[in-house]
Image (spheres, rainbow, N blue to C red):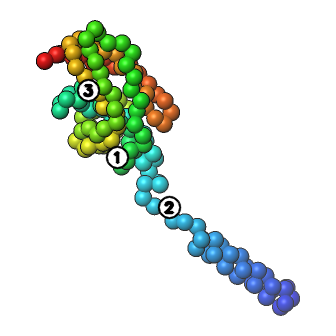
Amino acid sequence: MQGWAKRGLEKAGALAVAALCLAAAFTPARAGPDNDPDAYVTNFFTGGGSGGILFAAGTANQECLNIGPPAIEVISASPGVHLSIRPGTFIVTGTDYGYLVCQGQRLAGTIVTGTGTGTAQIRVTYPPIGQWYTHTLTLPGR
């Protein structure tokens, strides 16, 4: 191989290595939860049963960061049962889906309080994709 051709190949190789180094320098590092598939799990948490809260629900990720409040609506209720549904915070005691990583922590969500004696059926719809189920509440009266 001619000397000039050999030097040309060496320069081309050096330029290719330099280009790869530049590309690596400007590629953001991916560390931490980005490499953990569980970091993106959506958990549906429940609570209530104390402090006047009959039922509570919230949606959070693995780091207990709120993803949005569930929608709760009354489907039916015994005569004399009156429910109040509003945004609020509650202590996580259970899960409808996912890991119980936030157990014992206070989480923002939707809470249900009420008065009367009897039962009520509610529909709980979790964000982000609208999964729902029905839940029966029993109000013992006071």
Q: How many marks?
A: 3
Quarter of the figure with residue 120: top left
- Which label belongs to residue 30? 2
Q: Is residue 100 visible?
A: no
* Disc 3 residue crowd, few under 14, some 14–19, many 20+, Cα 10 Å: some
How far, Cα to Cα, is label 2 from label 3? 44 Å
* Disc 2 residue crowd, few under 14, some 14–19, many 20+, Cα 10 Å: few
Vertical placement of 120 versus 106: above or below?
A: above
Vertical placement of 118 versus 18: above or below?
A: above
Which quadrant of the rendered structure holds the N terminus?
bottom right
Q: Give 133 or 8, whichever is nearer the viewer.
A: 133
Mark 2 or mark 3, whichever is nearer to me: 3
Residue occupying the point 84% across, 90% down: 4
Q: In the image, what residue type sits under mark 2?
A: Arg
Q: Are marks 2 and 3 in contact (CB under 8 Å)?
A: no
Give the mark nearer the N terminus: 2 vs 3.
2
Vertical placement of 108 versus 73: above or below?
A: below
- Which label belongs to residue 64? 1
Q: Give 74 or 125, whichever is nearer the viewer.
A: 74
How far from the left and from the top, in percent, is residue 50?
A: 18, 30
Which quadrant of the rendered structure holds the C terminus?
top left
Find the residue positioned furthest to the left: 142
Looking at the image, residue 72 sits to the left or right of residue 101; the answer is right
